[in-house]
Amino acid sequence: MKSINAIVAVLFLFMLVPMAQAQRISAFVSAGAAASQIEGDELKGFKKWGFAGSVGAFANISSNGRWHLSIEAGYARRGAYENSGDPKTPYHINLSLDYVDIPLTLFFKDPYGGIYIGLGPVYSRLVRQPHDEIAYNPDYFVPDVSDMTFLKNDFALAGEIRFPVWRGLMMSLRYQYSLIPVKKDWLFTEYLRANKSKAQVNINNCYNSSVMIRLLWQFGTPDDGFSSKQRL
């Protein structure tokens, strides 16, 4: 059922393409990578890398060509990665979360440099959760792996910048952060060297945080809403 929902969303976007001429809409595809971390798990750094790609529609919604609206349906792998690198306190965590993303972004176009700056909400659906690897030394670090299930729905806010590269090719940078927890009340036990005791640590809430770097190809250019004489 999850896969069907994702396919329907993609097909819906492709159905927008035949309607594009009258509505000043163009279609695009993108591919790149997402660097992510899970805020709240006490592991720092955007060390988890995964593929990110999408199809979408891009529309001019203003007469002067400065305001645009973008909607996408895409895939991104997020999660957490950490390797202590210390033989005395060894642990290795590689957690993967596969999402279908549907971002809706309002863009402002710089009339001089052609750079698009946008902000908008993102709905993400967790479609697959391969646990990968969680290895640890129980004398130092004991995570609770009895319940590794993350919440299916992720509502986030994203900021994005798109830079023109050549013709329809653009570079996209997007930062995305969850507005609601993707996992609640995650516990683990931590070894305290000072007094050689163990303490139960409640992480409480975890949030997805990711930076996406993509190349985006736009098929055709939507009407900017003004003449070539006004462009000069």
Image: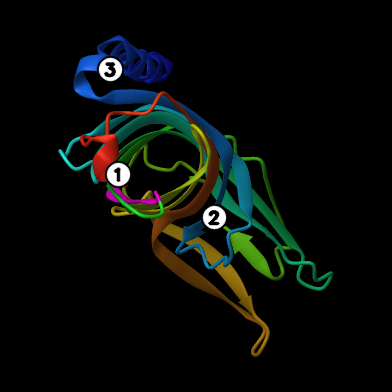
Residue most extreme to the bottom: 194
Q: Which residue is drawn at the image coordinates 59% and 35% (left, top)?
A: 130
Amino acid type for the residue under numbered disc 2: Asp
Label located before the other in sequence (3 or 2): 3
- Of badges 3 and 1, nearer the viewer stands 1
Q: Which one is nearer the viewer's eye here, 169 or 144?
A: 169
Magenta stretch?
114-121
On residue 144, the disc is: 2
Residue 102: which quarter of the image? top left
What coloring was used for the rendering? rainbow
Identify the residue position indicated by label 3 in the image: 20
Q: Which one is nearer the viewer's eye here, 13 or 2?
A: 13
On residue 231, the disc is: 1
For mark 2, does the 10 Å Cα neighbourhood hold few (<14), some (14 to 19), or many (20 or more) residues?
few
Q: Are marks 2 and 1 in contact (CB under 8 Å)?
A: no
Residue most extreme to the left: 63
Label located before the other in sequence (3 or 1): 3
Q: Quadrant of the N terminus?
A: top left
Q: Which one is nearer the viewer's eye here, 85 or 120?
A: 120
Taken as a whole, is the magenta stretch helix, strand or loop? strand
Residue 211 rendering spot, x and y as whole percentages: 50, 53
- Of badges 2 and 1, nearer the viewer stands 1
Marks 2 and 1 sit apart, C-alpha to C-alpha, by: 60 Å
Residue 46 rendering spot, x and y as whole percentages: 58, 59
